[in-house]
Image (cartoon, rainbow, N blue to C red):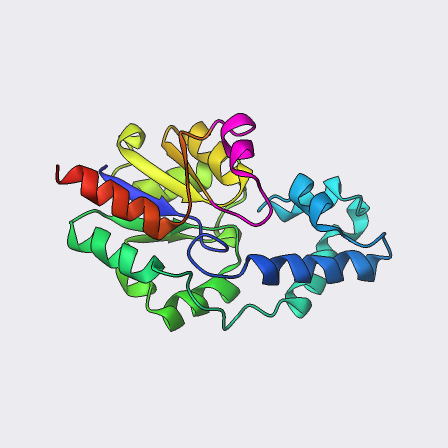
């Protein structure tokens, strides 16, 4: 691999439950029926406009729903997922450029990146409010890969994410698409619905296996 990029929420940092609970509050505030985990897993997308439309939020209320979400979100001080930082450090030590492509807003994610020390390891970061096109459109990932200097060789890069739209974006951009274990998506869905190249239990597990195979 010439470069490896990652999603942020639920992939590197333990915020999947925080994101879900904030969306529960959004649905409650709008006056829709309670949001179940099953329905959330069926319709969740990092592209929040797309997800809110699928969950039945009227279009005129979508922008306001985003403000409700930010007010309800409690993941600002979340920890990195086990082994995530060490895995990123190992990739950097191996000379592999890494980056993050997230649907999260700069005002939320940039602080988390700095607080956890991950910002110092990254060669590129693309935030959700940096760009008009959103996941699963390939443009955010193309921008992140280009910032690492490898925009012309997507087939020699990989993207790891914990949602189906992460995998779809990687596929659309021509990168190796790795679905990372999620509490809201069965592993089979990454392979069957999003056409992932593979599924990993965690970033740490995938990086360990990748680096081990690389040295054989």
Give the answer, above or below, for where 119 lies relative to 161.
below
The verdict on residue 36 being magenta is no
- Say whether residue 135 is left or right of residue 208: right
Q: Nearer the viewer, residue 72 or 87?
A: 87
Task: Decide if residue 173 is in sight here.
Answer: yes
The residue shown at (65%, 44%) is 41
The answer to whether residue 175 is above or below residue 104 is above
Could you tell me which residue is drawn at 76 percent across and 44 percent down? 55
- Residue situated furthest left in the rendering: 216
Residue 84, above or below 212: below
Residue in front for this viewpoint, 155 or 200 = 200
Q: Quadrant of the N terminus?
A: top left
Q: Quadrant of residue 68?
A: bottom right
Q: Is 114 left or right of 191, judged from the image as shown?
A: left
Indicate the quadrant containing the C terminus: top left, top right, bottom left or bottom right: top left
Magenta-tinted stretch: 181-195
**Left or right of residue 31: residue 210:** left
- Percent of width and height locating residue 132: 54, 44
Whole-percent x, y for residue 145 in the image = 33, 41
Q: Is residue 10 left or right of residue 71?
A: left
In x, y percent, where is residue 78? 49, 69
Residue occupying the point 23% across, 51% down:
91
Residue 50: in sight, yes or no?
Answer: no
Give the prevailing secondary structure in the magenta stretch. loop
Tell me the residue at 37%/50% (across/down): 203
Residue 155 vs residue 182, the one in the foreground: 182
Number of numbered callouts drawn: 0
Is 185 contained in the magenta span?
yes
Q: Looking at the picture, how far across and down is residue 213, in whole percent?
A: 20, 38
């Amino acid at each position: 691999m010439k470069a490896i990029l990652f999603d942020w929420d639920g992939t590197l940092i333990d915020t999947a439950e925080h994101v879900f609970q904030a969306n529960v509050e959004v649905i409650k505030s709008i006056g829709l029926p309670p949001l179940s985990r099953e329905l959330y897993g069926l319709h969740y997308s990092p592209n929040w406009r797309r997800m809110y439309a699928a969950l039945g939020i009227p279009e005129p209320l979508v922008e306001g729903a985003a403000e409700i979400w930010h007010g309800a979100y409690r993941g600002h001080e979340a920890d990195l997922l086990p082994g995530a930082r060490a895995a990123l450090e190992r990739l950097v030590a191996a000379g592999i450029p890494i980056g993050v492509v997230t649907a999260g807003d700069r005002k939320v994610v940039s602080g988390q990146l700095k607080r956890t020390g991950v910002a110092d390891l990254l060669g590129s970061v693309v935030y959700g409010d940096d760009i008009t096109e959103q996941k699963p459109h390939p443009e955010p990932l193309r921008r992140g890969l280009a910032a690492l200097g490898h925009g012309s060789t997507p087939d020699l890069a990989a993207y790891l994410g914990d949602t189906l739209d992460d995998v779809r974006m990687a596929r659309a951009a021509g990168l190796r698409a790795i679905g990372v274990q999620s509490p809201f998506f069965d592993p089979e869905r990454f392979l069957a619905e999003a056409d992932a190249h593979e599924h990993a239990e965690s970033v740490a597990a995938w990086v360990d296996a990748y680096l081990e195979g690389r040295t054989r």
